Image (tube, coloured by chain):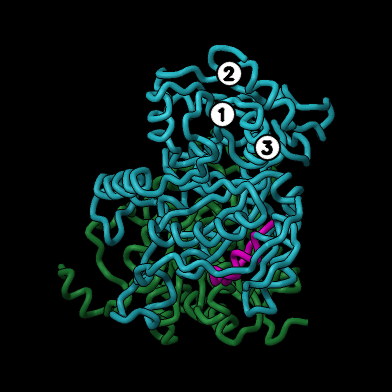
Chain colours: A green, B cyan
Amino acid sequence: MTTTAEKTWLSGTPKLWVRHPAGSRQCPGCHHPIIERLIAEVVEEMGLAKDFIMVVGVGCYSRAIAVLDFDGIFTAHGRPPDVATAIKRTLRGKPIVMTLQGDGDCLAIGAEPLMNTVARAEKITILMINNLNYGTTGGQMAPTTLVGQVTSTTPQGRDPALTGFPVHAPESLAAYRGVAYTARGSVHTAANYQRAKKMLKAALQKQVDNIGLSFLELISACPPDWRLNPVESLKFIDEKVIPEYPLGEFKNLDKLV
Amino acid sequence: MAERILVQGNEAVGWGAVSAGVEAFFGYPITPQNEITEWFARELPKRGGVFVQSASETGSINMLYGGASTGRRVITSTSSPGWALMQEGMSCLANAELPCVIVMVQRAGPGQGTTRHAQMDYFSVTRGGGQGGYKNIVLAAASVQENADLVQLGFHLADKYRNPVVMLTDAVIGQMAEPLELRTLDLGPLSPKDWALGGKGAHADGKRRVLSCGQGQVPLEPYTTYLQFIRVLDQKYRTMQEQEVRYEKYHLEGARLVVVAYGYCARVSKEAVAQARKEGLKVGLLRPITVWPFPYQALKDLALGGAGFLAVEDSLGQMVDDVKLGVEGKGEVHLLGMLARHADTDAGMILPQRVLQEIKKVYPGGH
């Protein structure tokens, strides 16, 4: 059995990923801590920490603000794009501003700020975690819930006749002229983790290079609300989630046209 | 002699904000405050500032939240329906302790109401329309000059307390034109904003800064528990109530009847009081400049001196409740509200003659 110290020695821990007295509140098998680590690694490797400001919405992932060692602000539900816009503009474009949002925060209650921030071509980065449901509040239907998926507000499974279809954010947002980059990644395997890191780097680079808005969706397991164990959740991502939400880049521009 | 220009009250907000060193404006169009948004769109960028037209008032207030988090002076403006949309954001600004100024040019309600003057949002503005029982200073201007001066005071108080400040006006104050003396008020020193975001590299100690409207969910520095944070808010709100009450006294010496009014109704009432004094009635005017905190003690002292009170406001009666809280049952309190308007259309106003008529009607001992 490996100890925590040995694990740290074996895998390394990003300097920007720190402990918080409140401790971890994540459920077994949750991918949010993996995404926290990914953000920490990317910001560290790109050397952005001194100029970085993270704007978090409301969800289980909100605690990232406590454990990531750079400037951050926790906002009202769905509002990070507006808050990020103002930070970026008020500081005359200097900081690198990234939102961290869930699929409900970003696409449901936050649809208005999302669409209008994209329409204004703000030079910020939006990182949306997609776990197919509202995890924090006990697993209700989200815009991203799969057809047929059982949630606490779709007890018979999501029926498109009643609740429509899953929303594909990076594909849709790619159509906007102010968007420089959109992609979808996953962190459920080591290889995908590395691909996702490259995507976040590419997304942030668009902002560093002052090109346009960048948007990255990362798929994230939510085992308790998916009614699966952590290992089954990984299989579910391969078999059910990725067929609905294909991974890859959907837009990558060096200049807005 | 400072330069004097003829401007609308709404435009004076812009001149005052620039004097206060405002760096960004975020706003959404709504009548009767459009002149403010348009002034900033025209004037702020050429002074090196930032103007962003939001997609709703919910957007404006959350942009204000982001702008204020950088420690720079930021402002938004709106009117009643937009104000309603801002309430969650107001509560978040109070929780995250972010200084900023919100200009609220009242129009008539309820619902979409009318686009013209009224004073029907007093409760919403002074009691905190958002969740969680926060408090914010509310400054009520009654002239074009005061619009410019109180914006400067508003920024100062916002910074002093790390709290949002509301400038409460109405369509009459906003759209009337008067001479404005362009002046920068010296309001004294303030502490540096060591808490503001800017990236770790922007901070002298090189340590991160975090701000949150969710203190209690994940306690963040400097607070370790939720109640510790609530105690800090409580102390702040008490200090505001003890130190920041402001009001104008007009002919209060020996007054047997005290008219209480703010905003455009204070202008109207002042004229009525002047006429009543000419006619030998001992009538005065107390005009709250801070409607939160309200000048309760001043009213209580006047009540103990034997005065009666007439609240004049263009609503069905909201501020009158604050008058009653101040008077504590120690004097009679009357209301002249919006049913006393001179016309049934949305152009109807409470006019000086009507206030004078009411003064004579409720004057202690009869007239």
Chain on which label 1 sits: B
Question: Disc 3 marks which residue?
Answer: B271
Q: Position of residue A125 (x, y in %)?
A: 56, 72
Residue closest to the eye, B184 or B281: B281
Identify which residue is drawn at 33% across, 49% down: B236
Earlier-in-chain disc, 2 versus 1? 1
- Determine the CA span between mark 2 and mark 3: 17 Å
> In the image as oriented, which residue stretches furthest toward the top?
B365
Identify which residue is drawn at 42% across, 77% down: B199
Residue B354's place in the image compared with A154, above or below, is above
Asked if residue A127 can be seen in this view, the reply is no
- Determine the CA span between mark 2 and mark 1: 8 Å
Residue closest to the eye, B144 or B165: B144
Identify which residue is drawn at 72% across, 35% down: B108
Question: Disc 2 marks which residue?
Answer: B363
Quadrant including the C terminus of chain B: top right
Residue B283's disc number: 1
Q: Is residue B39 highlighted in magenta?
A: no
What is the magenta range? B13-28
